[in-house]
Amino acid sequence: MNLLDTRVYRWLDVATDFFLLNLMWLVACLPVVTIFPSTAAMFGVVRDWVRGKEDSLTRTFVTRFRENFGQSILVGAVWTVFGVALFLDFLVANQLPFGAEVVLKSVLVLVCFLYAFGSVFLFPVMVHYEADWKTVIKNSLLISIGRLPTTVVCVVFLAVMVGLTVVLPFLVIITGSVTAYIVYRLCDRQFRKIDAAFGDA
């Protein structure tokens, strides 16, 4: 087997892994209530990839799904309720006098940015650190603000991937896993710096 064949084989092997991971994630999301555990499982798998750990894709996904099930459900529920509350606050703001509406919406826009920033690190933090759900949310917000350039890059990348999927729906077969990998890889660089600064493994 020549060098070109080896590279093609390697590329196909990687592409297959991303496709299978994306497929498992989509299937595991079907009950809707398992969207958060399945997303945590997907991030757990890509964390292992980024960290150079080789193991069965299916076994790793199932293991991460079980490990993060309870916490991801709780974190997801809290995060969803908070997002819905933000939406309702905007509806309330629309009913206020002009001056009060401007003030409230200005505050809400700032909170929305924090919400979006925290969302970027939510799953990476969940699978990287062992912590209770409150600490996961707190650390996601703190790290997203403290590592703002990375957060902004991730937000832009996520927006682009969502846009591509809307325009080209067939990309849904691969965009989930690719997005998770790129986002975690960017986040992992910051985790390594944080871990080194605090002397963690």
Image (tube, rainbow, N blue to C red):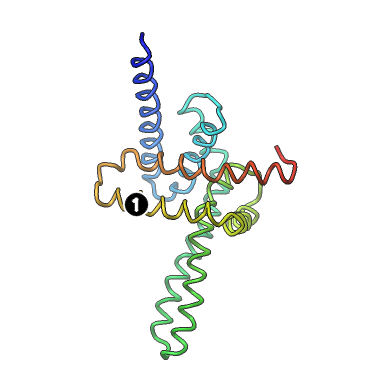
For this view, does 22 lie left or right of residue 136? left
- Seen from the viewer's position, the closer of residues 61 and 162 is 162
Residue at position x 53%, y 44% in the image: 69
Residue projecting furthest to the front: 3
Residue projecting furthest to the top: 1
Residue holding disc 1: 162
Count of picture labels = 1
Residue 154, image x, y percentages: 47, 51
Quarter of the C terminus within the rendering: top right
For this view, does 201 lie left or right of residue 101? right
Residue projecting furthest to the right: 199
- Seen from the viewer's position, the closer of residues 129 and 80 is 129
Quarter of the N terminus within the rendering: top left
The amino acid on which the numbered mark 1 sits, given as a three-letter code, is Val
Residue at position x 66%, y 48% in the image: 131
Image: 110 above or below 44: below
- Seen from the viewer's position, the closer of residues 13 and 146 is 146
- Tag 1 secondary structure: helix
For this view, does 8 lie left or right of residue 183? left
Residue at position x 65%, y 54% in the image: 135
Image: 3 above or below 197: above
Could you classify mark 1 by the number of other residues whose Cα lies within 10 Å: few (under 14), some (14-19), or many (20 or more)?
A: some
For this view, does 7 lie left or right of residue 61? left
Image: 109 above or below 6: below
Residue 89, image x, y percentages: 45, 76
Image: 127 above or below 163: above
Residue 151, image x, y percentages: 52, 54
Residue 38, image x, y percentages: 46, 42
